[in-house]
Amino acid sequence: MDYSQLQIWAIILGLGVGTVTLRFSFLGLIGRRHLPEWVLRHLRYTPVAVLPGLVAPQVFFPAATGGETDPARLAAAAVTLAVGYFTKSVLWAIAAGFATLMGLMALAGG
């Protein structure tokens, strides 16, 4: 579909207004209020819940392999999880997973 300049700018403006509205609804309207402890406890787990949703498609259905599961990516994900679990360090986990993925891809010639 071919969009005109006006339509593109209307879409950008609409998405911007939607983003600001969503953020303001949470931060602006209840940002200064005291939230119950159970809400705060659940909010602490938001990054832990979002990150796997971002990473899992790249591990199980990577675009680089045409959507086919790749043993190198599965191994890198397993190493990342193991290093993260034992070291409790996100940076070490990322570095180990990256090194594993690059090493296995180099061995496979890809």
Image (tube, helix red, strand yellow):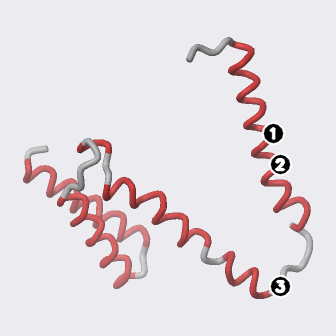
Q: Quickly name the residue at label 3.
A: 36
Q: Quickly name the residue at label 2.
A: 21
Q: Residue at x 76, y 24 (%)?
A: 10
Question: On the rendered structure, is 75 left or right of 83?
Answer: left
Question: On the rendered structure, is 52 left or right of 92?
Answer: right
Which disc number belongs to residue 17? Answer: 1
Tag 1: residue type?
Val
* Quadrant position of the N terminus in the picture: top right
- Image location of residue 30, percent across then percent down: 89, 67
Q: Give the quarter of the image for residue 19.
A: top right
Name the residue furthest bottom.
Answer: 37
Q: How dense is the environment of label 3, judged by Cα within 10 Å: few (below 14), some, or many (20 and up)?
A: few
* Quadrant position of the C terminus in the picture: top left
Q: How dense is the environment of label 2, judged by Cα within 10 Å: few (below 14), some, or many (20 and up)?
A: few
- Image location of residue 96, percent across then percent down: 28, 67
Tag 2: residue type?
Thr
Disc 1 vs disc 2: Cβ atoms closer than 8 Å? yes
Name the residue furthest front.
Answer: 1
Q: Is residue 66 above or below residue 68?
A: above
Label 3, label 1: how far apart the Cα atoms are: 29 Å
Count of picture labels: 3
Tell me which numbered mark, 3 or 1, is placed earlier along the sequence: 1
Q: Residue at x 47, y 57 (%)?
A: 54
Q: How dense is the environment of label 1, judged by Cα within 10 Å: few (below 14), some, or many (20 and up)?
A: few
Which disc number belongs to residue 78? Answer: none
- Image location of residue 25, percent across then percent down: 85, 57
Tag 3: residue type?
Pro
Secondary structure found at label 2: helix
- Image location of residue 59, percent across then percent down: 32, 58
